[in-house]
Image: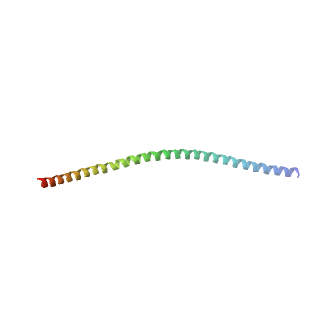
Amino acid sequence: MQNEEIFVVLERHDQKLGSLQKQLDELKAVQKEIKAMNESLIEITNEIKHTNASLLSCEVKINELQSAPVKTWEKIAVSVISSLLCGILGYVLARFFG
């Protein structure tokens, strides 16, 4: 090889190295962004877990509040039915023994 050919080959290698260095720098920037996104996703995931726990707690409380009136009406119904049955039984017994 002559000096000129060596110079041309070295020039091509320098250009290729420059191009590869630029690509490497771009990849480093992308990698940094991906790392930041990953950290953000971890934070969001933790917040979602906390939110889910809070929602479960609220759901239990809401279910309790929704069932409270039903229980009250059940107690009222039992009391009314018991009173009616006792009244009828008292009337029947009074007629039978009276």
**Where is residue 34 shown, x and y percent of the image?**
61, 47
Give the number of marks.
Answer: 0
Foreground pick, 36 / 56 = 56
* 56 relative position to 42: left or right: left
**Where is residue 72 shown, x and y percent of the image?**
29, 49
Foreground pick, 3 / 37 = 37
* 3 relative position to 73: left or right: right
* Residue in view at x 54 percent, y 44 percent: 43
* Residue in view at x 63 percent, y 45 percent: 32
Q: Which residue in the rendered view is the most extreme toward the front?
A: 97
Colour scheme in use: rainbow
**Where is residue 38 shown, x and y percent of the image?**
58, 46
Q: Which residue in the rendered view is the most extreme toward the right?
A: 2
* Residue in view at x 68 percent, y 46 percent: 25
* Residue in view at x 20 percent, y 51 percent: 86
Foreground pick, 46 / 18 = 46
**Where is residue 48 shown, x and y percent of the image?**
49, 47
* 96 relative position to 10: left or right: left
